Image: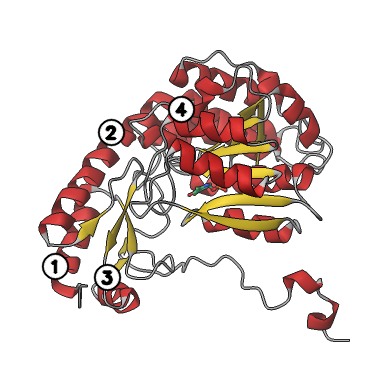
């Protein structure tokens, strides 16, 4: 039998996640922080990795206790909410965190709900874990209001709800009232994906954790921390959620190299987070200058901006690529998403857009 015939029925005909990785001068398509690590961080990281290499013959700390306590301290410092090691879990990127959550709380016969348009991996990870995915709608301005979001959750009664704040690809952040209303309406787990929290003007859902044992907040070092290649994501939740994930995680999932690298990043957190201010300046500049070109721009609390609307967004995408600028076509009719880059990259994008925007609707 062919491989296609052997594949799980529910995976046949699916397409994998595939943001293009093209060799282009200005890459503004995957929401990375454009500022590379400082020489001091590179040196510290190399020293910690060398130290870890001395015991490479042994398996790493399976529970990554040192790293989790460092992450708990970072979250406590940045949100003002006291968190302990037992409330924090870490994995290879927040995508692995999300996968572990659905392995434990989703799966065959269970349903996850997301508010579209949103991060495509929520849907894809649901599919990969055989969790049924149902899409609820956002308002035309891409926002969610407490009553509207709560009633969608009450109606579908999902086992898992995905909220994303700030939301990818729209940049829209949620007011805490929306999260509280969804939590009260839900019977299952409520996951708030805060991959872009450090760029946001709104408070973190971490402050809502006390007394809400079904609430999970996921974070990543891939965006504000400028550490995408290291693959480090984490969550904050009730210790019972962290215990449940031990049942599905692979033993020794987080290599000693990843743990050492992430501890180096945490030791330099202030310096890394300082780049966020520069990125925010470029994001706000994007909003202002794209609007000045006569286009629509969605208000953004993240490090990217959704803009349009184009008669054929793929033609505009190609027009920008022809001018050496890679942005993201997220498959949303009329719209494109651009990441805030360095000042220089952002200028290059704005010039390319003015020349090559194509037909607007
Ligand atoms: C980029 C992104 C992530 C990060 O994924 P990692 O696996 O941590 O790199 C998670 N959620 C959203 C919404 C994102 O945009």
Label 2 crowd (10 A; few <14 / some 14-19 / many >=20): few
Q: Percent position (x, y) of residue 177?
A: 45, 29
**Is tag 3's residue or tag 4's residue first in the polypeptide sequence?**
4
Residue placed most toward the observer, 241 or 148 = 148
- Where is mark 4, residue-wise? 204
* Numbered disc in front, either 2 or 3: 2
Element class at badge 2: helix
- Where is mark 2, residue-wise? 277
Q: CA distance from mark 2 to mark 1?
A: 26 Å
Residue placed most toward the observer, 303 or 67 = 303
Location of residue 147 with respect to 25 vertically, above or below: above
Q: CA distance from mark 4 to mark 1?
A: 36 Å
Label 3 crowd (10 A; few <14 / some 14-19 / many >=20): some
**Is tag 1's residue or tag 3's residue first in the polypeptide sequence?**
3
**Is tag 2's residue or tag 1's residue first in the polypeptide sequence?**
2
Residue placed most toward the observer, 352 or 132 = 132
Kindly identify which numbered label has been placed on residue 354. Answer: 1
Q: Percent position (x, y) of residue 250?
A: 81, 44
Q: Quadrant of the N terminus?
A: bottom right
Left or right: 176 in relation to 233: left
**Is tag 2's residue or tag 3's residue first in the polypeptide sequence?**
2
Q: Quadrant of the C terminus?
A: bottom left
Residue placed most toward the observer, 72 or 292 = 292
Left or right: 290 in relation to 215: left
- Where is mark 3, residue-wise? 324
Q: CA distance from mark 3 to mark 4?
A: 36 Å
Farthest residue, direction bottom: 1
Whether tag 2 and tag 3 are in contact, CB under 8 A, the answer is: no
Inspect this view and state whether residue 186 appears. Answer: yes
Residue at image point 65% right, 49% down: 156
Left or right: 16 in relation to 253: left
């Amino acid at each position: 039998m062919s491989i296609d015939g052997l594949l799980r029925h529910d995976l046949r005909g699916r397409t994998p996640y595939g943001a293009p990785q093209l060799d282009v001068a200005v890459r503004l398509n995957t929401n990375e922080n454009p500022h590379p690590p400082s020489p001091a961080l590179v040196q510290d990281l190399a020293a910690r990795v060398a130290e870890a290499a001395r015991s490479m013959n042994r398996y790493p700390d399976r529970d990554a206790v040192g790293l989790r306590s460092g992450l708990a301290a970072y979250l406590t410092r940045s949100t003002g909410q006291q968190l302990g090691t037992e409330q924090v879990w870490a994995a290879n990127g927040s995508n692995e965190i999300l996968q572990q959550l659905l392995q434990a709380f989703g799966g065959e016969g269970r349903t996850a709900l997301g508010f579209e348009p949103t991060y495509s991996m929520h849907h894809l990870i649901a599919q990969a874990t055989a969790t049924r995915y149902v899409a609820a709608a956002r308002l035309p301005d891409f926002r969610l209001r407490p009553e509207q979001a709560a009633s969608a959750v009450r109606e579908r009664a999902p086992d898992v709800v995905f909220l994303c704040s700030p939301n990818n690809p729209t940049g829209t952040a949620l007011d805490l009232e929306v999260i509280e209303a969804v939590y009260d309406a839900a019977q299952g787990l409520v996951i708030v994906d805060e991959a872009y929290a450090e760029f946001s003007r709104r408070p973190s859902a971490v402050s809502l954790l006390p007394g809400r044992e079904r609430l999970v907040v996921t974070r990543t070092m891939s965006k504000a921390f400028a550490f995408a290649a290291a693959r480090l994501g984490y969550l904050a939740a009730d210790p019972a959620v962290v215990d449940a994930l031990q049942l599905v995680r692979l033993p020794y999932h987080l290599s000693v190299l990843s743990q050492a690298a992430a501890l180096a990043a945490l030791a330099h957190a202030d310096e890394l987070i300082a780049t966020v201010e520069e990125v925010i300046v470029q994001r706000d500049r994007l909003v202002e200058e794209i609007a000045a070109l006569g286009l629509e721009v969605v208000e953004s609390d993240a490090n990217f901006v959704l803009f349009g609307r184009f008669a054929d967004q793929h033609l505009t995408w190609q027009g920008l690529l022809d001018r050496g600028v890679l942005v993201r076509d997220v498959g949303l009719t009329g719209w494109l998403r651009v990441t805030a880059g360095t000042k220089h990259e952002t200028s290059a994008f704005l010039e390319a857009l003015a020349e090559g925007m194509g037909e607007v609707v």
